[in-house]
Amino acid sequence: MIKIKELLFTKKFLSKKEDGFGLVDAILSLTLLAGIITYGFYFSSLRLSTLYSANLIRSINKEIERDLERLKVDFWSTYYNEDNKKYIITNNECDDFSQKIITLPSINEMVKSWRPGPDRSKVFTGKNVLITREIQISSPIENEVLNNSIASIDYTVNWGYKNEHWISIDIVPEAHSWCEQKI
């Protein structure tokens, strides 16, 4: 009976010793696990950062598109006559339309800056984006064949440490076929 107890005890003891992890195996396993978890966090945060940048760029483009649509509606309604249901524009206004651009309802100043809020997009929480619209009016050349005024609308966007020129748009009356070309 003693031999059976000794045999069972030694067999249990030997099986624990043979089946268990050693210190080196445990350290190696923990190191590999820590490395995998670290890379997992790194790549998931990199993915989230990329998604945030893409959503931010899309939201900025939508905000600028809204502003341009507002300007376009104001500009189209400037020469529209409700009584005749058509656009009425004189040749003098075609030659120099700079005063009409300045007096549009959407343009109360030549440089306008605004911070879109979270009501426009969830990306704009924290007031971290500043959009600036600058309108410049110039004359291309002193030539009677060409129009004497061109308006350029420049948008710049500041977010974080970035200050980027986003888009420039040139506007002339001929672009909307209001004025006939003098050739």
Image (tube, rainbow, N blue to C red):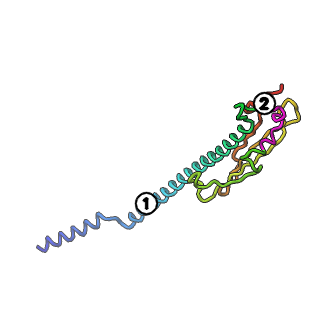
Q: Amino acid at mark 2?
A: Cys
Determine which residue is flagged by label 2: 179
Front tag of 1 and 2: 2
Q: Is residue 148 left or right of residue 58?
A: right
Q: Residue at x 21, y 67 (%)?
A: 11
Label 2 element class: loop
Res 167 quadrant in image: top right
Res 30 quadrant in image: bottom left
Determine which residue is flagged by label 1: 33
Q: Amino acid at mark 1?
A: Leu
In front here: 135 or 49? 135
Marks 1 and 2, the one that precedes in the sequence: 1
State whether the magenta stretch is mostly helix, strand or loop: helix
Asked if the residues shown at circle 1 and circle 2 are in contact, with their CB atoms under 8 angstroms apart, the answer is: no
Q: Residue at x 83, y 31 (%)?
A: 91
In front here: 68 or 46? 68
- Find the magenta span and give its range: 90-101
Q: Can residue 167 be seen in this snapshot? A: yes
Could you classify mark 1 by the number of other residues whose Cα lies within 10 Å: few (under 14), some (14-19), or many (20 or more)? few
